[in-house]
Structures are given as C-alpha cells and as structure tokens.
Amino acid sequence: MLEKLKGIIENYVDVDPEKITPEARFIEDLGFNSYDFMSMLGDIETEFGITVDETQVADVHTVGEAIKYFEELQG
Amino acid sequence: MKELNINGAVMQCYPLSAAQRLHYYTIRYCPTQVLCIGTGLYVQQDVDFAVLKKAVYAAYKMFETMRLRFVQDEEGNVFQYIVPFEEREIPFEDYSNCSEEEAHAAMRRRTAVPFERFNSPMNEVVMVKLPGGYSGIYLKVDHMTMDSASIIGFNKAVLENYCHMKYDYPEPAPLKPYIPQLLKDLEYEAGSEAKKRDEEFWAAKIAESEPMYTDFAGQGRLLTQRRENGNPNQRYAMVVSQSPEASISVYPLEKEPSMRLMKFCELYNVPMASLLLMGMRTVLSKFNDNEKDVTIKSCVARRGTLSEKYSGGTRIHFFPMRTILEPDVTFLEGIKAISAEQNKIFRHANYDPIELIMKRGQHWKYKPGTSYESISLTYQPLTINRNTPDMPDIAYKSFWYTNGVAGQPLYLTVMHRPEDNGLNFNFEYRVDAVTEQEMEYFYYYLCRVLFRGIEDENRTIGEILEMI
C-alpha cells in the first residue's frame, strides 16, 4: 500500500519521493494543508475501494497511521 | 467543447466552470459590478525595464490563463479559449515625482475600469516607478480568468524570470496546463457520481435547520427588516444594494503578534483559517446578543493537486460555514469543531455555490438578495517569496487595489505580507453598508478575541465574551 499511497501523495505535494516514509507527517514534513489532505481522500477512496470517515481521519498525522487506518477499512 | 471561428481562425472553445459562472452572473445581474483585481509588486532596487518587459512576456508564455479570452456564440452562450501568443505593448509609468498616495490612487482608478468582455485580453501589465526607490509592475486581471493564488503565481513568475535573465538565477519551473483542469471541472458538473454525492451532502446540510443572520454591526439591520416585513421571526437579511461603491481598508498586524497566531496553529495542529473563523464568529456572536448560531461565508481555493496549484485560472468557491457553539465550549474546542466542519466542506467543495445558494433560498423561502451571512473570509497563505530559496534578498512591497465596487457588504481577506510574513487584514467594504468606524470596531474586537483565546486555549466562549 505504501507504494500506491506514495504515487497519490506525489500528485499533491512537490516533495522528494524518498521523504515519503511511514514516519513522515503529512503537514509538517510533506507540506500538506488541510484542503490538500481532504481532497486526497477522494483519490484514496477510489484507489483502495474504501469510504473514509472525516472525523476519524482527523487522528491521522503520519503516512504510517494513514496506511494502518486504510488497511483497517479494507478489512 | 465547441469550435468557433474567431477573427478568421478556428478556436477550440470551452464552457465556463462553476467558479467562472459565479463571477459572470454577478456582472449579468448587476451591470455596475466590476470584476477587475488590481495588484502592485514593487522592489527596492534600480530595475532594468527592458529586462522586466522580457520577464513579463516569458510569464505570459508560462501562464495559459493570462492568454484566456471569452466569446459568445450565436445563441449568446459564453465560451472561453486560449490565444497561443501574447506580446502586447507594456506601458511604463513614472510616479517617482508624485507622493505615494497619488501613485496608488492612479492604480486604483485604473483598477476600476472593466475589460471588454468578449474577444479581448482580460489583463493588463504596467511597469511602474514609485517614489522612494521602488519599481515594479502593476497587474490588473479579470476575476473570471485568475484568482489571488494565480495572481501571486504570475507575479512570482515575473520576478523569477527577471532574476534568471538579469542575474542568472535558475529558470522558473514550467507550469501545468489549464484546459485539463477545466475539463475535470466540466466532467464533474455533467452529472458525475461525485456531484450526486455532493448534492446529497449539501441538501442534508440545508435541511438541518434555518441559520441565523448575524451582522458585523450588531442587530440593527435584522431588527429593522423584521419590523418592515412584519415578521418578528425573520432569520435572514437583505444584504445587496443598488449602490455598490466600495473601498478597501488594510489593517496590518505586526510581525510579532502575527507569529504568535501562527505558532498557536502549529502547536495545536489547527489551520489558520479555522482560528480566524473562530475569532470572527465570536465577534459576531458578541455583536448580536451572544447569538450561538453564526454563519460566515468561507472561501475554498480548491487547489489540492499540483496540477490544480500550478495551472492558473480562477477556482474559488464560497460556502456558508455555519457554527453553533455553546458558551461552555472552550476556544480550542471551538476551533477544532470549525476545523472538522471545514474538512467536511472541503470534501464537497466542487459543488456549484450558486446552485447551493439557490437551493437554500428555495428551501427556506427567502427573497433574492437576502442572506444569512454578513461577512466573508478568505485566508490566502501564499506569498510571493514563499518557497523560493533561489531568489536574491530584495525588499518588496505588495498592494491590492480595490476596483471600487462590491456586491456584499464586507469581505475580509487575510494575507501574509511578503516582506515579514506578518498578517494583513484587508477589509473590502460597500460604503453604503459599512462605516470606517464599524470596520475598525470589528477588527479591534477580532484581535481581542484572538489574543484572549490563544493566551489560554481552555477559556470558554462565554468567558471570552465577558472579558472583551
């Protein structure tokens, strides 16, 4: 999932792909703002066939946490 | 898409997006409205104007939407197309012997003159020399072609091209094409599943309950209209006017207190726009008998992907941001609630704002021209020198000039100053609806709420309302 998510993230922020690690924080390390992040969720839903809950996703700060949350949704 | 013959050439023409229609309807239904945005970017150094002219032409090549024009077909439908090349004469004006106020007054007068709507360029660049050793460019664009993010991008491109040509700094990166982004918007609007989801979201939002109008100058406007209409329960107010004359007042917040607001946002991981909305809604509550139900028109820039960020154009949608907060909610809890609501809106921000306002009006049966919002907020995080480490250290001045008219009573745009990253609060106001004193009062209370809130994030709204 990390590789697919990396591909999506690269469409949103101009960042060195090597910096997109599980520890990377979306806002502080990758330069996301809240609109970028919420907008990206639409692409993630399409790519992984899941439906994201905006209130739960507020607790997601790092790429690793995002992967864990999306994997849980996939069952 | 349609092919039209324009001045002997067959051009690919595209319908307007929802963001463009929002502006187009404004001038269609209010013919005195002007859609021009004027800006000035001036640097404190001896500018080589021959090189600057080349830098502007290079920026025209980079920005497709600076070459965007409009056309009407035989049925009166409006389309847009891009001309391949733009090298119009760029005039030079020397104001170095005038006062600074005289120079800026000349730019304001220029900004008030609208463009020819069809088959004509929709922007104008003037090279300018100001008093005090500053020189640079004045830029006027039509809002149907560019928004503030695009304007900042164009000014930045001119500056980067100039530094590249004059001082051999790196060439600016190419931009993204505009038409694919427009086609994505048009595809969304043509009955997509995403639009259906957004329609359901906004229909449910509208039906929740009727919002309450809260005025930036207190309850007078609503109470008067209730009396006039013989409806003591009226919750909306007439906000449009036949007299759209407008002005801008800018209140600069010093660097240090601006940094305190930014540090607070960093510390608690909340967006600046949510902090500002919390401040504004608390002031509106204070001015309207501690009303808990406050709605503000909030701007969504709709630039998430890199293609959206770097393709120019106008992408802004406005949505009602409704907050219902009890007095025992803390300042930080309030910001987080606003942030959560903003996130929901972001997920449905492609929806046509005109359709939304029409549906809300039909649902609550209010008259055209009335609203639940007295003020709108735009927070613009971009600055000309942000993320450009390759630029030389130059002193800047930037200005936004009013076009002299406004549809709504009061628009607040909060922007970072390029010179020190402090915040400027730009109030654009309709002179028949807002007095200078009312605006100052609003800004004064906004600052009081913001700083009382950030010095103790656990203070409740009720406590803050009493303190201020």
Image (cartoon, rainbow, N blue to C red):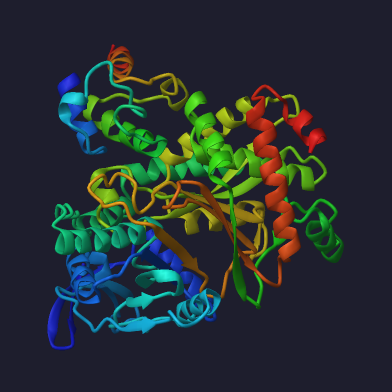
Provide residue B420's location: percent of width, then percent of height: 45, 48
- Does residue B204 appear in the picture of this structure? no
Q: Residue at x 64, y 46 (%)?
A: B295
Provide residue B126's location: percent of width, then percent of height: 34, 78
| Residue A40 placement: quadrant | top left
| Residue B146 placement: quadrant | bottom left
- Does residue B297 appear in the picture of this structure? yes
Q: Residue at x 78, y 48 (%)?
A: B287
Q: Is residue B158 left or right of residue B43?
A: left
Depth check: give the residue in front, B372 or B64. Answer: B64
Q: Is residue B204 left or right of residue B40?
A: right
State which quarter of the image contains the N terminus of chain B: bottom left
Q: Residue furthest bottom?
A: B8
Q: Total number of numbered labels?
A: 0
Provide residue B465's location: percent of width, then percent of height: 78, 36
Provide residue B216's location: percent of width, then percent of height: 72, 54
User: Where B207 falls versus B130 (above or below)?
Assistant: above
State which quarter of the image contains the C terminus of chain B: top right
User: Where B161 falls versus B450 (above or below)?
Assistant: below
User: Where B332 falls versus B232 (above or below)?
Assistant: above
